[in-house]
Amino acid sequence: MPPEGYPPLPGWIEDAYFALEWYLCKQSDRDSFTHHQATELIAEANPDFGDADIDHALEYLLNRGWLYEVDDQLFITELQCAKFDESND
């Protein structure tokens, strides 16, 4: 589910975003990742994605406000971890 006011993501970009969101929600000591880490996380979760697909997905997420960048670190704009906690109950 997109944050309030955001248009829904295309399915394949949502798959890329989900990998990033899941990673941060499972980390208690991290709230960001590098571009390289994001690329690796997406590739691991989506083995059918090529480098161009991953680059396009990250650019899409950055340009539309789903991610933002500060000092070479990428952050999720509205991290929503509750859906992961609910699925583990």
Image (cartoon, rainbow, N blue to C red):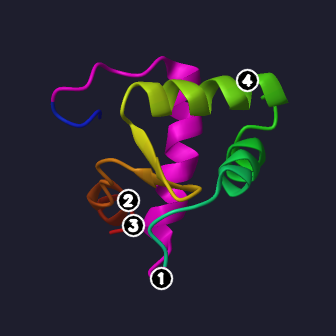
| Within-10-Å neighbours for mark 2: few <14, some 14–19, many 20+ | few
Which comes before the other along the chain, label 1 or label 3?
1
Residue underneath mark 1: 29
Q: Residue at x 49, y 70 (%)?
A: 26
Q: Nearer the N terminus, badge 3 or badge 4? A: 4
In this rendering, the answer to whether 67 lies above or below 61 is below
Q: What element carries label 2?
A: helix
Q: For the residue marked with disc 3, what is the amino acid?
A: Asn
User: Which of labels 4 and 2 is toward the front?
Assistant: 4
On-image quarter of the N terminus: top left
Residue 2, percent across and down?
Answer: 29, 33
Determine whether label 3 and label 2 are within 8 Å by CB. yes
Range drawn in magenta: 5-29
The Cα–Cα distance between marks 4 and 1, rounded to whole angstroms, is 29 Å
**Residue underneath mark 2:** 84
For badge 1, the amino acid type reads Asp
Q: Is residue 15 magenta?
A: yes
Determine contact: label 4, label 1, CB under 8 Å.
Answer: no
- Mark 1 surroundings within 10 Å by alpha-carbon count, few (fewer than 14), some (14 through 19), many (20 or more): few
